[in-house]
């Protein structure tokens, strides 16, 4: 869990660098060096999600629509996990209440 949190924070930092440089189209694409970024695991994950796109010549740009889509998907997953935990807690509470001596 901690590793994925760190990875998401690194991905956000990469995205912010592209947003600050306004590198959001093929025409405004920049190299990692221009953005003072070093491609690593977080970078490559963004590439695999098509959030970072390469129009050629080692230049990259941020696909804002895909970034928003990825964030929405992550939010939905987080909500599903929280809902699942709440359901499990509710079931445990009910099971604990029913297993007490003298319970109806």
Image: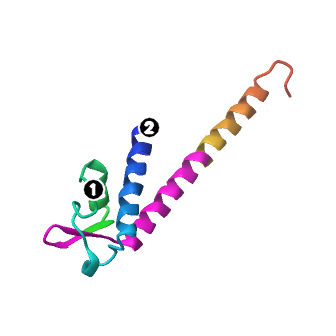
User: Is residue 79 shown in magenta?
Assistant: yes
Q: Is residue 47 above or below residue 83?
A: below
Check disc 2 and report its element: helix, strand or loop: helix
Residue 1 shows in the view: no
Q: Main secondary structure of the magenta part?
A: helix
Q: Which residue is mark 1?
A: 37
Q: Earlier in the sequence, mark 2 or mark 1?
A: 2
Q: Which residue is mark 2?
A: 2
In the picture as drawn, the residue positioned furthest to the top comes out as: 101
Foreground residue, 3 or 78? 3
Q: Is residue 64 above or below residue 11?
A: below
Residue 45: x and y in percent read: 30, 54
Name the residue rendered at 39%, 68% in the picture: 20
Q: Which residues are magenta?
A: 54-82
55 vs 68, left or right, is left
Quarter of the image where the N terminus is located: top left
């Amino acid at each position: 869990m901690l590793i994925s949190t760190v990875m998401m924070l690194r991905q956000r930092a990469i995205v912010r660098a592209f947003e600050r440089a306004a590198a959001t189209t093929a025409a405004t694409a920049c190299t990692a060096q221009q953005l003072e970024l070093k491609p690593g695991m977080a970078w490559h994950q963004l590439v695999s999600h098509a959030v970072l796109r390469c129009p050629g010549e080692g230049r990259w740009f941020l696909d804002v629509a895909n970034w928003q889509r990825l964030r929405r998907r992550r939010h939905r997953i987080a909500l599903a996990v929280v809902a699942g935990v709440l359901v499990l807690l509710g079931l445990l509470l009910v099971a604990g209440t029913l297993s007490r001596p003298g319970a109806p």
